[in-house]
Image (spheres, grey):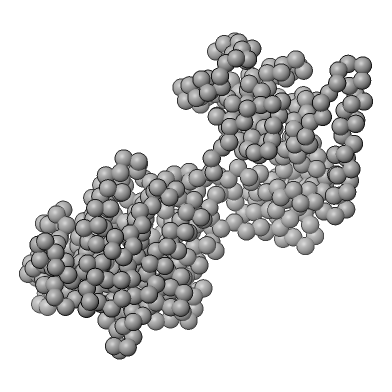
């Protein structure tokens, strides 16, 4: 295969698009890695450097390379890479209802804004594609509309693979209704309970209004659990249900304006049975409603306990505000559901003194969204501690990536895209090689340990900025002197690769067997510009 590939390199009229997608997608990963090593090994003379432009499309397709849009090396055709999205996929159904159709239901103030805030967090922080989110607001969120969106966007969505993260968020009124006869069939008698508990329902936009088959009796816990059970059977149990509602009436009538609970005036137990989701019939049903700790299909994060109330504050629902504040301040890739709830309570303090969010489900101790959606961010580079010098480290970027003495890099705990990842310190470049450099920790930075990651910000210390600028100014003149008597060398921009740098860097590499498991030389060189 390698001779055929080398033959392709000698064909300047070959279209890149016709080659690398077929070659890459149809080849085994081990073959790809082997080919990369052999091609790299063959680039040992200056004459072979003419083949570099035609290597780029192949390398870009098979390696996680980044692109600087203003870079043009040897007039290469550059194909922009899309914004990096999640490693796994996430699909979301977001529901927020302020204005209700029934005149007997008190409208709310901030459920719609909470839904939009949740949507912004998903798209901006977690980079969930907009087409993966279905947002239902006010009149869109009828009972039929919610069930239809649940089926089309989640259960029957061919884009969702088994194990992908699925999130369902609801902000609006909750309510209680008398249970129909035999609603808890077999459970009450076995537990010697004579008074059946009321049924918890989430109130859609048309709750307690006339429908084609009687009055709309909301989305009962039994119906929603059946929907989620259908979803779990089709797509797996990586499902999170977040509910900013409550099922306890306010103690004072004047408090109802800010409590996400409403009474149901006209819908009857018969309406509740009529509106039951079809797969819920015949299923054994617990009396604890949404707070069922035995559920195995999903993880529930809910605004408050059974006898508490979900309250709206000045800036939205207190629960949703606390959730977003906590989620933005922790590395989600290593945070469990129950730990996130604990952080919400500790951060919110007095704001949540009368309502305690709870997390329910056997998987509440696993990482949020099962860590399927946080891919490595290619802008972070591994950093290794040097045993020979205190506070000095090796970073796998060098002059081929436009690194100069005096450049600053920020240090971070992890390299995942999306989760909270603040800078924990700063290092300064002290020694530059073609594909790596030595950096020194600033005296006021925290201690840097093995396993941290560096991010280049190209900001220079004041003492070195003038030197780097001066060196760049003299670089074209120096190259011109070297080229006298041979050929005129066109000055390349400072971020271009230099032929001698590539050759010398390649010759300095350890033997081939030591390169196993490490990024190839070419890919490390190109990573700074593609």
Q: Is residue 113 visible?
A: yes
Q: How many marks?
A: 0
Residue 245: where, in percent of width, then height?
32, 71
Residue at (64, 12) in percent of width and height: 10
The image quadrant where one finds the N terminus is: top right
465 horizontally vs 62: left or right: right
Residue drawn at x 53%, y 23% as measured from the top left: 17
Quadrant of the drawing holding the C terminus: top right
In the displayed structure, would residue 388 be above or below residue 65? below
The residue shown at (48%, 43%) is 87
Tell me where residue 193 sits by quadrant. bottom left
In front of the other: 94 or 5: 94
Q: In which quarter of the image is residue 218?
A: bottom left
Quadrant in which residue 248 is drawn: bottom left
Is residue 107 depicted above or below 526 in this figure? below
Residue 484 in the image: x percent, y percent? Answer: 92, 20
Residue 183 placement (x, y as % from top left): 11, 66
Q: Where is residue 459 in the image (x, y as percent from the top left)?
A: 76, 51
Residue at image x 46%, y 70%? 321
> In the image, is 511 to the left or to the right of 251?
right
Question: In the drawing, does residue 477 fall left or right of residue 75?
Answer: right
Residue 183 appears in the picture as rendered? no
């Amino acid at each position: 295969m390698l001779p055929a590939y080398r033959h392709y390199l000698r064909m300047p009229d070959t279209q890149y698009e016709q080659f690398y997608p077929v070659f890459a997608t149809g080849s085994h990963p081990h073959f790809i890695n082997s080919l990369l090593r052999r091609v790299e090994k063959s680039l040992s003379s200056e004459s072979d450097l003419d083949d570099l432009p035609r290597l780029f499309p192949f390398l870009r397709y098979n390696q996680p390379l980044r692109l600087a849009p203003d870079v043009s090396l040897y007039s290469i055709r550059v194909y922009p890479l899309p914004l990096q999205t999640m490693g796994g996929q996430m699909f979301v159904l977001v529901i927020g209802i302020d204005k209700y159709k029934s005149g007997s239901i008190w409208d709310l103030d901030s459920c719609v804004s909470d839904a939009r805030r949740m949507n912004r967090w998903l798209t901006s922080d977690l980079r969930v594609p907009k087409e993966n989110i279905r947002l239902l607001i006010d009149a869109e969120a009828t009972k039929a509309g919610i069930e239809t969106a649940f089926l089309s966007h989640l259960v029957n969505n061919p884009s969702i693979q088994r194990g992908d993260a699925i999130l369902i968020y609801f902000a609006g009124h909750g309510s209680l209704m008398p249970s129909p006869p035999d609603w808890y069939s077999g459970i009450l008698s076995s537990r010697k309970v004579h008074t059946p508990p009321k049924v918890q329902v989430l109130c859609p936009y048309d709750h307690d209004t006339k429908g084609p088959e009687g009055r709309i009796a909301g989305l009962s816990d039994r119906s929603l659990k059946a929907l989620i059970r259908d979803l779990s059977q089709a797509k797996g149990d990586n499902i999170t249900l977040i509910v900013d509602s409550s099922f306890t009436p306010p103690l004072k009538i004047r408090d109802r304006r800010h409590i996400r609970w409403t009474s149901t005036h006209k819908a009857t137990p018969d309406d509740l049975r009529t509106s039951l989701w079809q797969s819920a019939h015949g299923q054994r049903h617990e009396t604890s409603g949404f707070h069922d700790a035995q559920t195995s299909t999903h993880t529930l994060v809910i605004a408050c306990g059974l006898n508490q109330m979900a309250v709206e504050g000045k800036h939205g629902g207190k629960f949703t505000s606390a959730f977003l504040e906590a989620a933005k301040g922790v590395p989600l890739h290593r945070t469990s559901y129950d730990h996130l709830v604990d952080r919400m309570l500790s951060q919110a303090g007095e704001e949540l003194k009368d309502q305690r969010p709870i997390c329910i489900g056997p998987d509440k101790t696993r990482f949020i969204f099962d860590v399927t959606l946080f891919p490595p961010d290619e802008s972070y580079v591994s950093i290794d501690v040097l045993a020979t010098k205190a506070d000095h480290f090796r970073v796998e970027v060098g002059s081929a990536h436009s690194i100069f003495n005096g450049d600053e890099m920020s240090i971070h705990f992890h390299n995942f895209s999306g989760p909270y990842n603040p800078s924990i310190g700063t290092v300064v470049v002290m020694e530059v090689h073609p594909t790596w450099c030595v950096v020194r920790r600033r005296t006021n930075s925290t201690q840097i340990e093995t396993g941290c990651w560096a991010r280049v910000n190209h900001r220079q210390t004041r003492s070195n900025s003038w030197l780097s600028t001066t060196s760049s100014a003299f670089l074209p003149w120096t190259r011109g002197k070297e080229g006298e008597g041979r050929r005129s060398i066109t000055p390349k921009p400072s971020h271009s690769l230099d032929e001698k740098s590539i050759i010398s860097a390649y010759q300095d590499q350890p033997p081939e067997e030591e390169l196993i498991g490490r990024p190839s030389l070419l890919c490390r060189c190109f990573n700074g510009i593609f």
